[in-house]
C-alpha cells in the first residue's frame, strides 16, 4: 500500500511487458477455480440435524459465489486490457524486469531451511537461510555475510530460546550449551 | 477514575521499558523502507507470546504510534514516505529540507504529531466508553451491517482496483473457513487432512503475506540507486523559529480535528485524513504563504502530520469498542488481543477495563517518549537507512521463519508460511491489496457467527438483515462513505498530479550516477 | 604514462586524500584516476558522491592542473574492488585513500574498505589521516 511520489512520473498506465497479462489471467483463473472447488467441497460438508436454519454450508457457498463472480469479472477486465498496477514500494523498481532467478533462490533457501530445522537445529538452519538469502540478493563480500548470518542466528537463539523461553531446537551442535536452551 | 488506574499500571518501570522498546522499534520500522508497522506487529506476535497481555499490548501500541513518527522522518529527509499516510508530508517537507529548513520541518512534524496524538488520545478516552455503551445494545443484525461496512470499505476503498480488493477479501474469508465450524463442529475444506482441521493460524498468514510476500516481491524488482540524505543543519533547540510556531499551531489543531473523526470511520484510514488536512491548509493559506505551497510551506507539514497521528488514534475507537479493524495495523492489533483470548468489542471496557485503560495510558506515555526521542535521534534513524537491502530482507525472512516455527514448533508451519508467502508475492505483483485479505481472515469467523445468529432469529428471512432502523442507517452511511471517498480520491489524484506538475523537481530525485 | 588512483569519499577525509593525491600525481607527472562508486544496495550511502560533490571535486582538480579521469557511478562490485580494479587497469604506481579510526564492531558491520585495499593492492598505498 505504500507508494512513492518518485514513481509518479514513471509511466503509470503503460504496462509494456506482454507476458504479464497471461500471469494475471492465470491468477484470476485460479480465483475462479478456488471458488468452484469451494462449491464442490462445500456441498460435501455434512449438515447435522442439530443445525439451525442456516447450516455450515451457507457461508462457504456465499464466499465461493463471491470468488467465482469476482474472478470472472477480473478475467473480463483483463481481456479488455485493464491490467493491475503492480504494487509500488521504496525498495521496488517498477521499471525493472522481474528477476525470477532471485525469487527462485529465496524460495529454495526457505525450503532448505524447512528441511534443516529438525536434523540440524534452528540456529544452523537460520544461519543458512540468512546467508543464502543475502547471497541471492547480492550481498558482498561473502565472508561478512557469513559472519553476520552466524552471529544473528546465535543472538536470536540466545534471546528467544535462552531468555524468553521460546522452544527453538538448538540442534546437536549447541545442545549442551546452557544459554541456547530455554 | 479508570484512566488514572491505567496510568498507575502504565507508569510501572517494567511497562515503561516495554513502551520505550515499542516506540523505538516502531520508529525504526517506520523509517525503514519496506517494513511497516503491520508487518512488525505480525512478526513480533509469535515471539511475544511469553509476555503478559498488558506488556504485549503496550509494545504493540508503541509500535503503532512510533511507525507514524518514523514515516514522517523519511518523507521529509529523503522524499520517500515510509508509509502511505506520509505521502503528503513529503510534498512540502522535502522541499523545506532542500531549502535548508529540514530541521524546522522535522520539528513541526514531531510536535504536531505529539499534540495531535495527545489530543486525539484524550478524545479516545472520552468517546470510546460512550461508543461501547451504545454498542452493547446492538444485536447481531447491526453487527452484520457494521462488518459489511468494514469489509467493503477496506476491500473496495483501500486499493487501486475495487475488484482486486474484493478478491483479496474473499480469499481471506475462504482461508478463514478452513477448519472446524464453531457452531456445528463439522469439518470444512479440510480434505481429510488433520493439519488443516485445526485451521490455518491467522498470525501465520499475516506474517507470510506481510513479510515473506514483501521480501519476495522486493527481490523480484530490487531497486538500485542511492538517495542522498539532506543534512539537518543546526541544533535542535533553534529548529523552530518564532514565525514557524505562529504558522504551525493552527494547522496542528485543525489537523487533529480532521484526523480523529476520519480515523474513526472506516473510510480509508490515515491517508484520507492527511490529504484532507493538506487540502484545507492550502485553501486557508493567504498571499505569500499560499505561493509557498508546493515549495515548502510549513503548514503543509504541520497539518497532515497532525491529522495522520490523530487518525491513528481514531482508528482505535472502532477497534476497541466494536472489534472492527479498519487498517492493516489495526487488524494485527485485533489478532494480538485474540491471541490472549480477549475479544475487542462492546464488552471490552467492562471485562478487560484495566487492560484497555493501561493501553490508553501507555499511548499518552508513548507519545511523550516519541516527542523527546524523535528530534535528538534523527541521526540514528538516518544510520538505519544505510543497512544494505540484502541484509535487511534476509533478516526479515529469518524473523518470519522463526515466528512461523514458534506457532506450533513444527516445520509444517514454515512450509505454510512459504506457500502463502508466494501467494502474497503474486498478489503484490498483480496489484491485489494485502490488507483486505487479513481483515477478511480475522473478521470472517465473527461475521459468519453473527450472520447465522441474526438469520436464526429471523428464521431464515434475509430481509431482516436490513429492516432494523440501526442496521438500515448503517447501510445508508455506507453508501454515503462510498460516494464521498470516490469523490475524495478523484480530488486527491487531481491535486497530487497538480502539485507534482507544478514542481517537477519533486518528481525525480533518484538520479543514478553518471556512468 | 604512470597513474595514481584516488579512492574518493565525499567528506573532509576524502578531500584531504584528494589533496595528497594531487600532490603525488604532480610530483610523479602521473594521471590521477578518481574512483567513487556505490553498489546502490541501500537507501542511503554517505560514501557515494552526488553530482554536486563530483563537479566540485572536478573543479578543484582542474585548477590544480593535473591530468585526471573519473570513475563515478553504480557498480556491481564493492568500492574496494573497484579501486583495485582501476589500479590494475591503469597500472597505477600508487593508490591514495583516506583512513579513519573504526571500532572493531563498526569494522565488522560496515567492513573495512581501506583494509581490503591495503591487503589487495599490487602497488604502494598512501593512507591519508585527516
Image (tube, coloured by chain):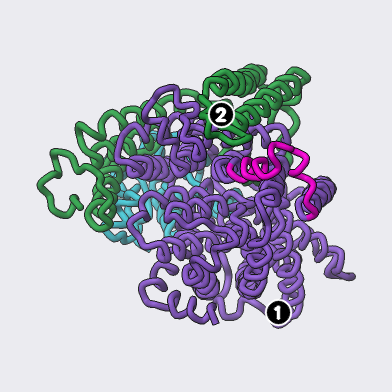
Q: Is residue B370 magenta?
A: no
Overall secondary structure of the magenta section? helix
Q: What residue would you read off at disc 1?
A: B245
Where is residue B433? Give x, y as percent: 63, 38
Please tell me which residue lies in front, A153 or C80: A153
Where is residue B383? Give x, y as percent: 45, 58
Asked whether the viewer can see residue B389, the reply is no
Q: Chain of mark 2?
A: B
Q: Residue at (31%, 59%) from the top-left corner?
A: C102
Mark pair 2, 1: CA separation: 47 Å
SS at badge 1? helix
Mark 2 or mark 1: which comes first in sequence?
Answer: 1
Q: Colour of chain C?
A: cyan
Q: Colour of chain B?
A: purple
The quadrant of the rendering that contains the C terminus of chain B is: top right
Image: magenta residue range: B449-469
Amino acid at each position: 500500500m505504500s507508494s512513492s511520489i518518485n514513481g509518479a512520473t514513471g509511466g503509470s498506465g503503460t504496462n509494456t511487458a506482454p507476458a504479464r497479462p497471461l500471469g494475471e489471467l492465470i491468477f484470476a483463473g485460479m480465483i475462479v477455480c478456488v471458488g468452484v472447488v469451494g462449491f464442490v467441497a462445500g456441498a460435501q460438508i455434512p449438515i447435522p440435524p442439530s443445525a439451525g436454519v442456516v447450516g455450515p454450508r451457507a457461508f462457504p457457498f456465499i464466499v465461493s459465489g463471491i470468488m467465482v463472480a469476482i474472478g470472472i469479472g477480473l478475467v473480463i477486465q483483463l481481456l479488455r486490457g485493464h491490467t493491475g498496477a503492480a504494487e509500488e514500494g521504496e525498495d521496488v523498481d517498477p521499471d525493472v524486469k522481474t528477476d525470477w532467478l532471485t525469487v527462485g533462490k529465496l524460495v529454495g533457501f526457505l525450503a532448505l531451511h524447512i528441511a534443516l530445522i529438525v536434523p540440524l537445529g534452528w540456529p544452523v538452519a537460520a544461519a543458512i537461510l540468512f546467508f543464502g538469502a543475502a547471497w541471492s540478493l547480492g550481498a558482498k563480500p561473502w565472508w561478512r555475510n557469513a559472519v553476520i548470518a552466524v552471529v544473528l542466528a546465535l543472538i536470536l537463539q540466545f534471546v528467544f530460546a535462552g531468555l524468553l523461553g521460546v522452544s527453538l531446537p538448538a540442534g546437536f551442535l549447541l545442545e549442551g550449551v546452557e544459554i541456547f536452551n530455554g | 477514575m479508570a484512566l488514572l488506574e491505567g496510568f498507575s499500571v502504565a507508569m510501572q518501570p517494567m511497562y515503561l521499558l516495554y513502551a520505550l522498546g515499542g516506540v523505538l522499534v516502531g520508529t525504526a520500522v517506520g523509517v525503514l523502507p519496506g517494513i511497516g508497522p503491520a508487518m512488525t506487529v505480525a512478526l513480533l506476535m509469535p515471539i511475544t507470546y511469553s509476555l503478559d497481555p498488558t506488556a504485549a499490548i503496550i509494545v504493540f501500541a508503541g509500535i503503532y504510534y512510533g511507525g507514524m513518527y518514523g514515516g514522517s522522518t523519511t518523507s521529509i529527509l529523503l522524499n520517500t514516505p515510509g508509509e502511505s499516510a506520509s505521502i503528503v508530508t513529503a510534498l512540502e517537507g522535502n522541499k523545506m529540507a532542500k531549502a535548508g529548513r529540514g530541521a524546522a520541518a522535522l520539528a513541526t512534524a514531531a510536535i504536531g504529531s505529539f499534540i495531535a496524538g495527545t489530543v486525539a488520545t484524550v478524545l479516545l478516552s472520552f468517546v470510546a466508553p460512550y461508543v461501547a455503551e451504545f454498542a452493547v445494545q446492538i444485536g447481531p443484525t447491526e453487527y452484520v451491517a457494521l462488518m459489511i461496512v468494514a469489509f467493503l470499505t477496506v476491500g473496495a476503498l483501500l486499493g487501486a482496483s475495487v475488484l482486486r480488493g474484493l478478491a483479496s477479501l474473499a480469499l481471506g474469508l475462504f482461508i478463514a473457513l478452513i477448519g472446524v465450524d464453531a457452531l456445528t463442529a463439522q469439518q470444512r475444506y479440510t480434505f481429510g487432512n488433520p493439519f488443516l482441521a485445526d485451521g490455518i493460524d491467522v498470525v501465520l498468514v499475516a506474517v507470510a503475506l506481510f513479510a515473506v510476500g514483501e521480501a519476495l516481491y522486493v527481490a523480484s524488482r530490487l531497486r538500485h540507486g542511492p538517495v542522498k540524505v539532506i543534512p539537518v543543519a543546526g541544533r535542535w533547540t533553534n529548529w523552530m523559529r518564532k514565525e514557524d510556531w505562529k504558522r504551525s499551531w493552527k494547522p496542528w489543531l485543525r489537523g487533529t480535528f480532521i484526523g480523529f473523526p476520519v480515523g474513526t470511520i472506516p473510510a480509508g484510514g490515515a491517508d484520507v485524513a492527511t490529504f484532507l488536512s493538506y487540502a484545507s491548509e492550502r485553501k486557508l493559506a493567504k498571499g505569500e504563504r499560499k505561493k509557498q505551497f508546493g515549495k515548502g510551506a510549513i503548514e503543509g507539514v504541520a497539518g497532515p502530520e497532525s491529522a495522520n497521528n490523530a487518525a491513528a488514534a481514531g482508528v482505535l475507537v472502532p477497534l476497541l469498542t466494536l472489534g472492527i479493524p479498519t487498517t492493516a495495523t489495526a487488524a494485527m492489533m485485533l489478532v494480538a488481543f485474540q491471541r490472549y483470548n480477549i475479544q475487542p468489542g462492546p464488552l471490552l471496557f467492562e471485562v478487560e477495563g484495566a487492560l484497555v485503560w493501561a493501553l490508553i495510558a501507555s499511548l499518552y506515555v508513548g507519545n511523550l517518549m516519541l516527542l523527546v526521542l524523535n528530534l535528538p535521534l534523527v541521526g540514528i534513524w538516518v544510520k538505519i537507512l544505510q543497512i544494505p537491502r540484502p541484509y535487511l530482507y534476509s533478516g526479515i525472512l529469518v524473523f518470519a521463519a522463526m515466528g512461523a516455527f514458534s506457532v506450533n514448533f513444527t516445520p509444517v508451519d514454515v512450509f505454510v508460511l512459504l506457500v502463502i508467502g508466494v501467494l502474497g508475492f503474486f498478489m503484490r505483483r498483480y496489484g491485489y491489496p494485502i490488507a483486505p485479505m487479513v481483515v477478511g481472515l480475522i473478521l470472517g469467523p465473527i461475521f459468519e457467527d453473527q450472520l447465522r445468529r441474526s438469520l436464526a432469529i429471523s428464521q431464515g428471512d434475509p430481509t431482516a438483515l436490513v429492516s432494523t432502523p440501526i442496521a438500515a442507517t448503517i447501510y445508508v452511511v455506507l453508501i454515503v462513505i462510498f460516494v464521498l471517498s470516490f469523490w475524495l480520491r478523484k480530488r486527491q489524484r487531481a491535486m497530487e498530479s497538480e502539485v507534482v506538475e507544478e514542481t517537477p523537481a519533486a518528481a525525480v530525485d533518484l538520479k543514478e550516477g553518471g556512468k | 604514462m604512470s597513474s595514481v588512483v584516488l579512492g574518493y569519499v565525499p567528506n573532509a577525509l576524502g578531500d584531504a586524500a584528494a589533496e595528497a593525491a594531487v600532490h603525488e600525481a604532480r610530483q610523479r607527472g602521473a594521471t590521477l584516476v578518481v574512483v567513487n562508486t556505490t553498489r546502490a544496495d541501500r537507501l542511503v550511502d554517505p560514501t557515494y558522491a552526488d553530482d554536486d560533490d563530483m563537479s566540485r571535486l572536478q573543479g578543484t582538480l582542474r585548477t590544480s592542473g593535473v591530468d585526471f579521469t573519473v570513475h563515478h557511478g553504480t557498480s556491481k562490485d564493492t568500492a574496494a574492488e573497484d579501486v583495485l580494479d582501476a589500479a590494475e587497469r591503469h597500472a597505477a604506481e600508487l593508490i591514495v585513500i583516506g583512513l579513519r579510526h573504526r571500532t572493531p564492531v563498526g569494522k565488522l558491520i560496515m567492513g573495512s574498505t581501506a583494509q581490503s585495499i591495503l591487503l589487495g593492492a599490487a602497488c604502494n598505498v598512501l593512507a591519508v589521516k585527516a
